[in-house]
Image (spheres, rainbow, N blue to C red):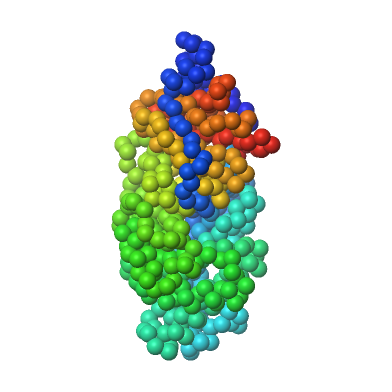
Amino acid sequence: MQATFSYLTVLVAAPLLADASPSLEVRQSQRVTVDLTKKYQAMDGLGFSGVFQRANLIVKLQEPKQREVLDLLFYTTTSAGFSIVRNGIGLTPSNNNDYMNTILLNYPSTPAEVTIDYSAYSWDGKDGRQVFLSQKAQEYGVNTFYANAWSAPGMHEDEQPGHQWRSALRSYANYLVAYINFYASAGIKAIHLGFLNEPDYSTSYASMQSSGTQAAEFIKVLRPTLDRANLTFVGIKCCEATGWSVASQHAQQIAPADAESIVYAITSHEYTSRISGTMRTIARVWQTEYSDLNDGWSTAWCSNGGSKDGFTWADTVFNGVVNSNLSAYIFWEGVQDRATNNNNNNNEKLILVDGQTYQVSKRLWAFAQFRIVRPGAVRVGVSGGSNLKSAVFRNTDGSAAIVIINSAATTQTIGIVLGTGYPVVNAWYTDNTHNMTVAAIMVGSDGATTAGGPGRGMISFLFKPAGNAIVV
């Protein structure tokens, strides 16, 4: 895909009308300088969930609508290009309402009877259509699947310290391994596992309360159970707190309990407290669930600065990744209908599926601007620019991905100073009227790349080294 003439062409070319010097062009622009030697966290990706049978909405869509929605979620060349799917491990014996089925329909007399190959497991091969969603995601190249339990089965969660309690921990670990194995039988390799969801919050649906200290005891049982089952590649996540403050407490409790080194990532939501600062932990940090649960459905990019706006979500993801060193950011639901939650058609989804039609929110396009940052990328240093928020990542293929938010009300010409060795450059922008639209760019003889970043908008650049000309 090559840059084409568009709304941004005049904005970029305007400085050259006064003086054709590439150097002058960069001086007149907002200069953003990349420092590839300064390295921060590695990225695992961005994602969403299809839990509580939301994935079934995609299954019910007839073609070509079904493929269009899947493209919007996973396609890396024109859409969001999500790289993580979060699947819910169910607890209920039925799929009434929007419940998630358990694989343990009947509880045995004692927890010790639940082994990895327990004969009474029940697997329907669908798992609330999460299997379908995961298999489709794989077709687009997604290979990061996060299996997350809302609670242990009821026979486990109320046990107190003692012999029976330790038996319950082993039983729950076996149960989780069995779930991962069922997915493997469907050709899906779950490489991340969480065993709690909002353990600081008591609800009417499946939940289980736990402190970080209690979680650490289970982590020390779960890790060897996974290893004995030849699942050494599975990374353990903990603890899905309702907010950043509680997640930080969990991290501080896990560390002295000698479990931090076997945790892949500390996980947090943002409902009760927003992400702020960096978390004190040697583990990676993921934000694994957040959305706007209050406002009515909106497809706006920048209306009133509320949490429904796409531009707000651009800031939200940027803040987490850049200011708090997140390695992953996962939105709540990829799709949802109008009727869920008592016809409360809110913004907890990126795409509204209404029967055989769908609407796409601008929140999806905020995430799409980060699609050039692929799993394994490392965030690197960047400086410069007024009213600009810039983040730069070095992908595993050597390409440099630059994501910029223009907080100014008007378009700013942005000059990227990266250096030589990147003969192919592409850029895309999003604002009120554009969705990841190809931007016109100019490259000066000094190697500086210039393009116009729209006011209250985003622009992303992908610099590819020689021999790498595939457009992401």
- Name the quarter where the N terminus is drawn: top right
Give the image location of residue 130, x and y in percent: 55, 60
Asked if 185 appears above or below 363 in the picture, the reply is: below
Give the image location of residue 209, x and y in percent: 35, 72
Residue in the foreground of this view, choosing between 352 and 235: 235
- Name the quarter where the C terminus is drawn: top right
Judge left or right: residue 351 versus residue 188: left
User: How many callouts does the rendering have?
Assistant: 0
Residue 304 seen in render: yes
Q: Residue at x 45, y 37 (%)?
A: 382
Residue in the foreground of this view, choosing between 197 and 162: 162
Q: Residue at x 56, y 26 (%)?
A: 447
Give the image location of residue 148, x and y in percent: 48, 65
Give the image location of residue 302, x and y in percent: 37, 35
Q: Residue at x 44, y 56 (%)?
A: 286
Asked if 69 appears above or below 272 in the picture, the reply is: above
Residue 291 seen in render: no
Asked if 279 appears above or below 432 in the picture, the reply is: below
Asked if 413 appears above or below 283 in the picture, the reply is: above
